[in-house]
Image (cartoon, rainbow, N blue to C red):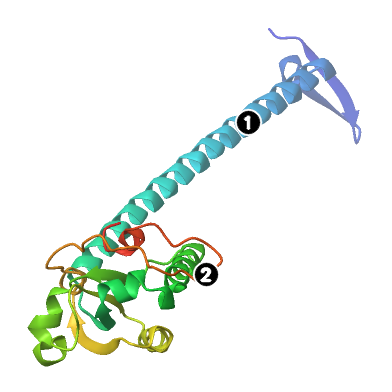
Amino acid sequence: MAPITGFALQGQLQILPATAQLSTAQQRNTQLAGSRGSLQCKQFLSCRSTRQQAHLKLQRRESTTVQAVAAADQQIAKSTSTKDTWYAVVSNAEFMFNDVQNESFAEQLRERRRYFGEQNREPDFYLVPNPAWLDDKFPDKAKQVRRPSAALVSTDKVWITFMKLRLDRVLKLELGELSLEEVTKSTGPLPEFKKPDKWTAPYPPYKPGWWEVFMAGQ
């Protein structure tokens, strides 16, 4: 028979089994064990949450990379197949690229390309040697251009108008809707030009072929 203990309550003797009473030390041990278990559980959940967050960040980063690649592929496809409205100035190639009158032409193109790079924009202008569309689309006006010919093309109508004023002796044309491949199609390369007999600028003339970096695909 288990020993019993008792105490007086309102004149009556209450009898409880000794096993129902926990010592103070046992209670502390129980509380400490519970605290440790709770802490371990919180640490486990926190670690698990951190891993989940890291995994989600990795998934988002991978998704962003995939989207960026897809956007780049779409941009490439668009640039070659989408038809935009193009404008152009056309003249004799030697006059446009090698005449002392147009000594600032190269620097203007470089500045525009540098600006587009700073804005993370694709160039909207190209130089085209012997453009194929000149004879195909403008047979009458093509007769006014001494060969070999060259053209500056762009989708920016205002800028082309400005370049017409700067270059002066050039034809300004609206080409209509063309793809990039169509507007930059050439019938052949340009010959090597002779150096001008007289060069009035304070710096030496640009090296032959300077315009090639502004051609499509360069």
The residue furthest front is 197
> What residue type is disc 1 on?
Gln
The quarter of the image holding the N terminus is top right
20 horizontally vs 168: left or right: right
Q: Residues within 10 Å of mark 2 (few under 14, many from 20)?
A: few
- Compare residues 68 and 141 and report the one nearer the observer: 141
Can you say whether 120 is above or below 37 in the image? below
Tell me the quarter of the picture where residue 198 sits: bottom left
- Compare residues 181 and 160 and report the one nearer the observer: 160
Residue 176 on image: x %, y %: 20, 87
The residue furthest bottom is 140
Can you say whether 44 is above or below 175 in the image? above
Residue 185 on image: x %, y %: 16, 69
Can you say whether 69 is above or below 16 in the image? below
Instruction: State the count of labels.
Output: 2
Camera-side mark, 1 or 2: 2
108 horizontally vs 95: left or right: right
| Disc 2 secondary structure class | loop
Residue 70 on image: x %, y %: 29, 56
Cα distance between the residues tagged 1 and 2 = 75 Å
> What residue type is disc 2 on?
Ala
x 48%, y 45%: residue:
57
